[in-house]
Image (tube, rainbow, N blue to C red):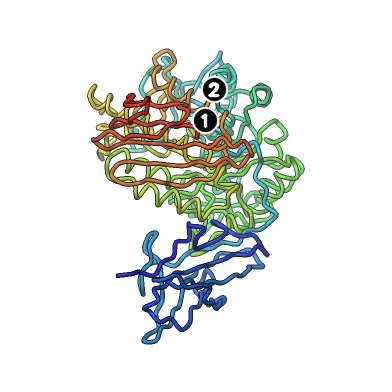
Amino acid sequence: MLRILFNSRSPQYKEPFGTLKPGETCTLRVKIPVSCQTRSVFCRMEQEDGRLFRDIPMTLQETVAPYETWGCQFTLEEPGLHFYYFRITTANESFALLKLGEDTNMEAGDKWQLSCITPHAMVPQWAKGAVMYQIFPDRFAKSGECDLTGKLTPYTVHRNWEEEVHWQPTMAGEILNNDFFGGNFRGIAEKLPYLSSLGVGIIYLNPISKAFSSHRYDTGDYKTPDPMLGTEEDFAALCQEAHRLGIRVILDGVYSHTGSDSLYFNRTGHFGEGGAYRDAQSAYRSWYCFRQWPDKYLSWWDFDTLPCLDKNDPQVIRYLIDDEDSVVAHWLKLGADGFRLDVVDELPDSFVLRLKKRIREIKPDALLIGEVWEDASNKIAYDVRRRYFVDGELDSVMNYPYRRAILDFVRHWDDGSGLKDTVMTIAENYPADVLSCTMTVLGTHDTPRILTAVMDDFEGTRAQYANRRLSPNQLAIGKERLMIASFLQFMLPGAPCIYYGDEAGMEGFKDPFNRRTYPWGREDRALQAHYTRLGKLRREYGALRDGTIAFFHAEEGRLGISRQATDGSGRNLEIYVNYNDDPWDIPHGKLLYGCGMKTVADDALALLPHGFCVIEV
């Protein structure tokens, strides 16, 4: 039985691919069997709230048995998110045509998405396709000793860099996260040549401001670096040396909440007698949302150590964004190149847009990335549809959907079709410039280490996590899977981000076991060499940094991916991954990198199970 055909990812049915800009012509075509005796076709476009936006009539354009092609052209004039489907009337009935994956479906399924994007958004050129490296500052590298004067107490400092992190609760059952290893700015600076050898172009630092905890998401003083990390001069020197090596530095912007132990809230009194908690007349009182002063207040996820800021309060906005020496201005002037906004879903659109405008006034090519765990193009947070891309609020976001899809593939939970659908959905829904610098992660400070995640999804207690390690056999399989996962991470669109130590073979479950110290001198050299090779390919091939993507195979454990260069170089790539039990013959081409291959007749190559390669065509 013939089906009605429409595929929004194929130029045969929709041009251009993906999002539109105001005034840009979009062409849609639907193929309907002649036997349907079609009388009329409309593209019904809705606004994001489900209200009808436009009914666009489609006309019969050609008949090539057994199909008729119906088409239309239109433009959108204002930025916004839309959803569309088709209404078809035949000689016998009228029905809706919706989608089911790449195929089509009648009267069921989802609507297609179409975003019109502001033409004024500009993504920094240096961020497109760059290799990123995420550093948890206390645990990456240490050089010398720091002046701990002013360090928020109590805290403990490990004597040995290789000791286990503190994971046990206190006698009161509290998890304090107040044990430190002394990683600092100077330690990071000394490791910059190593990061450069990996091909790193962007360092992303978890919070560096003065704070009580080792993770420092409980900000104590936004404008002061934590004494254990060093001074402002140390930070500026780090940025200066990184820039000399062609590496940019972005910081964690934690503007949803502060710590209760902070200059602004000051519940513990570490900052004297002032602060919103201790002084009803404090200048910071309006910063927080008190239900009943001083003990009842809005806090992040009900953690009373993380009181939420009122992001609409004029004083908060001035301090964080607008003032001459605002928080964002302060760090940019010291050398930072942008920010990753923590829990951006909890920041109002107006706040994010204002912050974006301000950082671009100070540094025209500053980068702004948001922490979003889902498809950010249609995200609804707190009952509000977010406008991250249509209004150009963010340059890009963290790309967790890729992580989930890659994990499903390497753990044999997906034959490749699911990964293809995830990748192409993000590619279709995100503006091309945004896609090129999505922060594509496999591991972060919020997830288990990727080497653990590819092998072990154990759920247990912190004591069980502390003592659980991969067996030698699991470790061997895990490293094989990690090589495939990271190969995909670097071959797909976006900015692949290495979580410190993943390239060295670190393992560990979620917080705090994913935050152990970097194993200097104990690295897995084979994995390091693999990541170095991937970084080199990123530097050399524009098709990986900013090229188009298409899948020519995605089933039965096999992936075939095409990356087409858009920089005029003509250096196009084909990527192959074989997770099937049988070898896979691949065509001739210039082999750039691969693993698990053998030569067959006429010097052609075959990809063995658990193999991968990239060739220039």
Residue at 56%, 43% in the rendered image: 436
Does any portion of residue 461 appear in the rendered image?
A: yes
Quadrant the N terminus occupies: bottom left
* Mark 2 Cα-neighbour bin, 10 Å: few <14, some 14–19, many ≥20: many
Residue 288, compared with residue 476, is above or below; it is: below
Residue 147 position, x and y percent, is 59, 19
Q: Amino acid at mark 2?
A: Leu
Q: In terms of secondary structure, where does tag 2 sit?
A: helix
Residue 211 position, x and y percent, is 54, 34
Tell me if 317 is positioned left or right of 563 in this view: right
Residue 125 position, x and y percent, is 66, 39
Residue at 27%, 24% in the rendered image: 476
Give whichever of 579, 405 is nearer the camera: 579
Residue 51 position, x and y percent, is 52, 76
Does any portion of residue 292 appear in the rendered image?
A: no
Q: What residue sits right under mark 1 in the picture?
A: 133
* Mark 1 Cα-neighbour bin, 10 Å: few <14, some 14–19, many ≥20: many
Give whichever of 477, 48 is nearer the camera: 477
Q: Amino acid at mark 1?
A: Tyr
Residue at 36%, 73% in the rendered image: 106
Assess whether mark 1 and mark 2 are in contact (beta carbons under 8 angstroms).
yes
> Distance between the Cα atoms at labels 2 and 1?
8 Å
Tell me if 359 is positioned left or right of 523 in this view: right
Res 448 label: none
Residue 11, compared with residue 45, is above or below; it is: above
- Dot 2 or dot 1: first in sequence order is 1
How many numbered marks, from 0 up? Answer: 2
The image quarter containing residue 464 is top left
Q: What residue sits right under mark 2 in the picture?
A: 195
Give whichever of 377, 16 is nearer the camera: 16
Q: In terms of secondary structure, where does tag 1 sit?
A: strand
